[in-house]
Image (tube, rainbow, N blue to C red):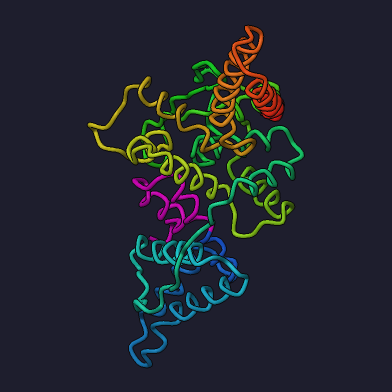
Amino acid sequence: MANINSFDYWMEQLANRSKSTKEHYALYFNKFAKYMGKSANELIEMQKEAEKHTGDRRENRVLEGKVKGFMKHLEDKPYSIATRKMAYAAVLSFFECNSYPLDMHPHDRPSGESRGSRIPEKQEIVKMLNAAKSRTYRATIFFLKDSGLRVSVLVRLRWADFEEFGEGFWGWKVLTRKRKVQATPFVGPETTEALKLLERKDERVFPIARTTLSNAISQIVQMAGLKDVSAHGLRKFFNVELQAARIPKEWRYQFMGKKVGAYDENRLSKLFNAYREAYDNLRVYGAGVNAEVEKLKKSLEELRAENQELRQQLNEHTLSSDEAKDLLERIKKLEKLAEQT
């Protein structure tokens, strides 16, 4: 038993957990080990010794007290409640998997509401884009708000896997690593225009590490003067905007790479048409302008037709002088309105 590396043994016991979970657990356990000034093996030895005490029962729970101190340390930093809960779970998992579980009470667990990042407004996303000096980071912000993908999925997308759908719309097919879900993300003209500016020097669209990209977006948020916004907030933005466009939840989940049922829509043409029709909801520049432009164009054509008809009546002299005068005034007003339109 003395030859077993406690940390490696723990990682082996987590073999059925997602890569992301194992990475986060390792990260926060190492923070605890640093806080304690001990190695993984030394922490197990501490717990072994604590379990041997049969006299003063307080000596059996030395590490439990240290864990509570670590939670307070993280709170003072301050780390979010979600992060503290993850760190707490990681430390408990380490001792439990090594067969020396800690005797923690339910009320020892970090408590509080975990709301996560908020949903940014469209004008706030524009501020983020303006603060991003790199073409690559601008493209990632566009991509995240247009697709609803996680950063971890985004950084694995390959140029070889994309398909053009016309009118500035592109799509990908990708298997998400966290949930093993086949996602069908699309992006619209705002994103594809940004992607066209990138140099393709790598088979990946965004040859960036997940952590590097997340940190970069956090810095951009700060430079934009925003609070409580993160890369995950753009995923939430995508979901609520398409919800407002009445895209079914299952279809939104299919776009985002969230788990859906076996009998949900998987016809690419149906999914794409729904996305394209709803895309104005995702635009941050001139949001909703396309539909309004079409409406104005139609009104302008009607004005021009009426104008032509009135001029024809004047030319044919079928109107009295008073009627002609009134019509001339109407024509002037219509022409002025047409110019404004």
Q: Residue at x 53, y 74 (%)?
A: 70
Residue 209 quadrant:
top right
Confirm whether residue 318 shows in the render: yes
The x and y percentages for residue 1 are 38, 60
Q: In what quadrant of the picture does the C terminus appear?
A: top right
Name the outermost residue toward the left.
263
Instruction: Name the residue nearer the viewer: 147 or 110.
Output: 147
Judge from the rendering whether residue 273 lies leftward or rightward of residue 221; answer left or right.
Answer: left
Q: Where is residue 265 in the image (x, y as percent from the top left)?
A: 29, 29
Q: In this view, does 206 lie to the left or right of 48?
A: right
Residue 198 visible, this orientation: no
Total numbered circles = 0
Q: Judge by depth and name the residue closer to the eye, 50 or 284.
A: 284
Q: Read off the magenta span.
A: 1-27
| Residue pictured at 54% horizontal, 77% vertical | 72
Magenta span: predominant SS is helix
- Residue, x 62% and y 70% (percent of image)? 77
Using the rendered view, name the quadrant where residue 322 is placed.
Answer: top right
Splitting the image into 4 quarters, where does residue 88 fall?
Answer: bottom left
Q: Where is residue 6 in the image (x, y as percent from the top left)?
A: 44, 59
Q: In this view, does 94 lie above or below 272?
A: below
Q: Where is residue 259 in the image (x, y as percent from the top left)?
A: 33, 40
Relative to 40, does residue 220 appear above or below in the rendering? Answer: above
Residue 7 painted magenta: yes
